[in-house]
């Protein structure tokens, strides 16, 4: 066993390795001559007060203790093994496939979108031509939504599975080892595609299959057991086990399941706006004026407030980031945020969203599984109409929104398709806009300087999580009514980010493996 020691240092001291070890040893009973090896295990910023400090967890191996390396990836040759279908090749689908070939199952992946390289052309068309390909966009395609929307790896899902193993697999396939150290690890949109391509190659080299432009269009069930699936309204494929990892925006899957009388339910989600500040302002606020410290990264923030019985909170905060157009079909607008690995853009953006319970919606019916989804769609449609029925989005300066004024002009923003000046108080549903307004006022008290008219809010931030739950058995992880159907990841309502989705993919395969081994 190793020894873990907590120390606190000034940011510039992190480069002084001798000092770090000396400080750690002074807080332990270990002699320097007994140290075999050591490392920084965890690193986090403590900016609660000035001066800003770094909290480090130092891990020391002494005596006969030996350091273990990262979890290697040991694929098996699954060319002739039992086949399982995986629908979707985002984080849940990718990790399900990797765990399958590690466990001796042959994954056959069907991804409706394109590979990471081909996706780029469709993303460019959204920005330049304002056209949305419903099968290839920021949400659909190899790697899922996370590939081109940031790569933040923070998760609170410590009890759901082996987070460290999932993280170490990312390092194995090319991510920087810093993701194992930082409290809020981040890869960056510029680096993720290469890592995801490496994962795909590993699946294929082990005997698995990956099919792009392959959309699930029908399911056959007999005697409550999955029998086969249809792809692209053409070919049928027989499978005993189907992992459904389609992501939170694959609405057609919910409609398909409902049409097949496969149980789905409305679930809570969140909806709001994405606010953009200058990064230098957020640095100044968060670092108490020490914003030019070269040893500190671009600052992030986390905000939460209870407003009229609902939570309002920051979501997917992107330091040094960009706001992206993330609609998945014509006739809607959607925002999301991402950052490159260096987080070196001049803007800071974050979703500010209101928790929504299905029973609070005006059209709520306990028998309607689409009440949350319909509300989500109505907001995206209203914003599309308000901004001119293109991929431009409705926007308003922050103080103008709080005070109910239409903005006469705007500072430059990172949203490249363009913005249209509106009064978002009149575009967003009242239950959302009034809570956002109260929350922003409260946030301004918590972060002095946050409420400035140089900040711009962009609407809507609507794809925080799935508005539909595909219920499953808590023990077997298969659907509550259909054996062999494994609802998985964000699209099924069991994850809220890259790592929690990845872990859920692993867990679903582990459940399948229990049936056969």
Image (tube, rainbow, N blue to C red):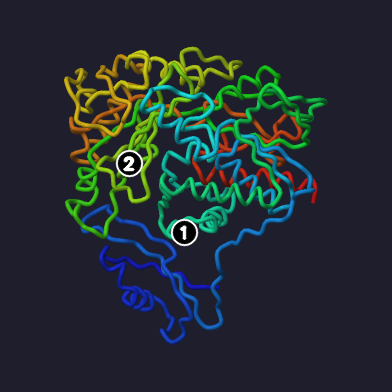
* Residue at image location 73% in from the left, 54% down from the top: 77
Check disc 2 and report its element: helix, strand or loop: loop
Residue at horizontal 63 percent and vertical 24 percent from the top: 264
Taking the spot 24% from the left edge, 19% from the top edge, the residue there is: 421
Side of 249 relative to 332 (left or right): right
- Residue bearing the label numbered 2: 321
Q: How crowded is mark 2: few (under 14 residues within 10 Å), some or many (20 or more)?
A: many
Q: Quadrant of residue 120?
A: top left
The reply, left or right, for residue 83 in relation to residue 138 is right
Q: Which of 464 and 420 is in front in this view?
A: 420
- Asked if residue 304 is positioned above or below residue 298 in the image, the reply reads above
Q: Position of residue 417 (x, y in %)?
A: 33, 26
Q: Is mark 1 on a helix, strand or loop?
A: helix
Work out whether 310 lies above or below 190.
above
In which image quadrant can residue 232 be found?
A: top right
Answer with left or right where residue 298 lies relative to residue 71.
left
Vertical side of 235 occupied by 96: above or below: below
Residue designated by label 1: 180
Q: Quadrant of residue 65?
A: bottom right
Q: Earlier in the sequence, mark 2 or mark 1?
A: 1
Return the mark for residue 148.
Answer: none
Q: Position of residue 51 (x, y in %)?
A: 21, 59
Task: Kindly report the distance in space between the C-alpha atoms of the residues bearing marks 2 and 1.
Answer: 22 Å
* Mark 1 neighbour density, 10 Å: few (under 14) some (14–19) many (20 or more): many
């Amino acid at each position: 066993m190793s020894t873990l020691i907590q120390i606190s240092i000034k940011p510039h001291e992190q480069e002084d390795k001798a000092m770090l070890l000396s400080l750690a040893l002074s807080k332990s009973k270990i002699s320097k001559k007994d140290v075999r090896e050591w490392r920084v295990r965890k690193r986090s910023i403590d900016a609660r007060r000035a001066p800003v400090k770094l909290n480090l967890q130092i891990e020391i191996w002494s005596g006969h203790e030996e350091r273990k390396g990262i979890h290697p990836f040991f694929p098996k040759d699954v060319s002739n093994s039992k086949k399982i279908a995986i629908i979707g090749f985002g984080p849940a689908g990718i990790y399900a496939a990797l765990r399958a070939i590690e466990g001796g199952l042959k994954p056959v992946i069907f991804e409706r979108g394109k590979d990471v390289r081909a996706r780029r052309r469709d993303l460019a068309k959204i920005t330049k031509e304002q056209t949305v390909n419903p099968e290839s966009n920021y949400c659909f395609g190899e790697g899922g939504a996370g590939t081109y929307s940031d790569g933040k790896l923070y998760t609170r899902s410590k009890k759901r599975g082996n987070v460290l193993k999932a993280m170490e697999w990312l390092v194995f396939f090319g991510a920087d080892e810093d993701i194992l150290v930082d409290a809020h690890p981040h890869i960056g949109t510029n680096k993720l595609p290469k890592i995801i391509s490496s994962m795909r190659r590993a699946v294929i080299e082990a005997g698995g299959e990956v099919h792009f432009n392959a959309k699930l269009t029908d399911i056959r069930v007999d005697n409550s057991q999955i029998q086969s699936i249809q792809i692209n309204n053409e070919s049928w494929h027989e499978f005993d086990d189907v992992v459904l990892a389609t992501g939170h925006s694959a609405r057609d899957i919910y409609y398909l399941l409902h049409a097949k009388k496969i149980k789905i339910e409305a679930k809570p989600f969140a909806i709001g706006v994405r606010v953009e500040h200058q990064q230098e302002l957020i640095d100044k606020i968060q670092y108490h004026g020490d914003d030019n410290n070269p040893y500190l990264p671009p600052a992030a923030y986390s905000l939460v407030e209870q407003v009229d019985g609902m939570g309002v909170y920051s979501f997917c905060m992107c330091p040094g980031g960009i706001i992206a157009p993330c609609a998945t079909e014509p006739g809607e607008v959607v925002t999301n945020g991402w950052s490159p690995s260096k987080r070196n853009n001049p803007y800071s953006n974050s979703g500010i969203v209101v928790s929504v319970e299905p029973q609070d919606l005006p059209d709520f019916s306990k028998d309607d599984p689409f009440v949350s989804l319909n509300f989500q769609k109505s907001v995206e449609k209203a914003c599309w109409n308000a901004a001119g029925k293109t991929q431009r989005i409705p926007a308003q300066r922050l103080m103008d929104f709080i005070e109910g004024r239409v903005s006469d002009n705007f500072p430059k923003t990172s949203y490249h398709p363009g913005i249209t000046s509106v009064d978002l108080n009149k575009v967003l549903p009242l239950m959302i806009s009034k809570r956002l307004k109260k929350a922003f006022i409260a946030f301004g008290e918590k972060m002095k300087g946050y409420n400035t008219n140089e900040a711009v809010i962009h609407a809507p931030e609507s794809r925080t999580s799935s508005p539909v739950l595909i219920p499953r058995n808590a023990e077997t992880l298969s659907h509550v009514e259909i054996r062999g159907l494994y609802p998985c990841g964000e699209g099924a309502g069991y994850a809220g980010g890259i790592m929690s989705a990845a872990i859920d993919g692993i867990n679903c395969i582990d459940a399948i493996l229990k049936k056969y081994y």
